[in-house]
Amino acid sequence: MKLGIVTPVLTLLPRAHATWEDTGTFADVVGIVQAADRLGYHHCTCSEHVAIPREVAETRGARYWDPLATFGALSTATTNIRFATHVLVLGYHHPLAIAKRYGTLDEITDGRVILGVGVGSLREEFDLLGAPFDGRGDRADDAMRALHAALSRRMPEYHGTYYEFENFVVDPHARQARMPLWVGGRTARSLRRAVELGDGWAPFGLRTAELADMLARARDTVAWSERAEPIDVLLQNEHPLDPLGEPDRVAEQLAKFTSIGATGVNVRFVHHSVEHYCEQLSALAALTA
């Protein structure tokens, strides 16, 4: 099972983050990600929001570090751990802008980027950025097709419903022959988008029973059966894991995830300090070895 961490400090969700994260620094993040790297964790995450309306920040949180700059800095302090945007909002960017920026990051990191993408749901932010909110699902589908055509090519070509380009050079571009596209979300449509257009599904905010039902339904579709490659399923634990204090309970949760088809987990821990977080990293790595 691929173990990834929902990186602390970078995003603060109300009533869902540890107190120490309020004053956490980038040095703390570096230490944690380096520990995860040494322990063999597959990836760390960073999400995207440009600006949050003040009233919305009370429920969604206000802190969102920029994933491009953050991952670029983290890459210089690590060796193997991969960097997953969870998620990049497709509607905020032209596909070629994503291909250039994250293709450059892929080159800098020696091919360690995973592009987690989402449709987005915050209309105020779309309006602020001058991005169309209505029809964003169809636009996201077209953007994913355009990204597959563009990410690893110096002279990409694509002719779609919303995006069209040819005779433009994108240099540098992604080092990976196919940069993984993981679709975030919590709806059946996000899972269908992942099956039809992506390489993985990385949902959040869903109970295990809901996830099991959605995955079971997806396996019965033609799109699932016609996939050339298996799809990654990166689940996120509803309640923070405590492998130090409750190893049996953690093992049971991971076993449930495996039984419903998870290939990995985006882990949230119980943690009270940087040191405690790193101890939890070690405990989970030992539990799953």
Image (cartoon, rainbow, N blue to C red):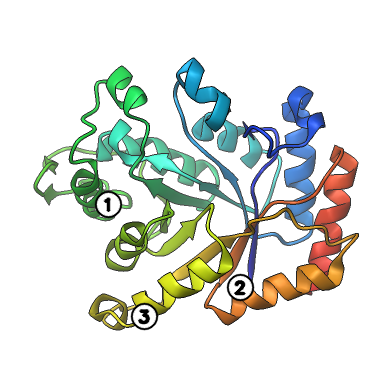
Residue 20 pos. (x, y %):
82, 30
The structure residue drawn at horizontal position 50% and vertical position 74%, both measured from the top left corner, is 212
Type of the residue with mark 3: Arg
The answer to whether 281 is drawn above or below residue 170 in the figure is: below
Residue 235 is situated, as x and y percent measured from the top left of the image, at 56, 62
Q: Is residue 82 visible?
A: yes
- Where does label 2 land, which residue? 257
Q: Earlier in the sequence, mark 2 or mark 1?
A: 1
CA separation, marks 3 and 2? 16 Å
Residue neighbourhood size for the residue with mark 1, other residues' Cα within 10 Å, grouped as few (<14), some (14–19), many (≥20)? many
Give the mark, 3 or 2, whose residue is nearer the N terminus: 3
Q: Name the residue located 21 percent from the left edge and 30 percent from the top edge.
A: 132
Residue 221 appears left or right of 108: left
Q: Which residue is mark 1?
A: 144
How many labels sit on residues? 3
Which element type, helix, strand or loop, lies under badge 1? helix
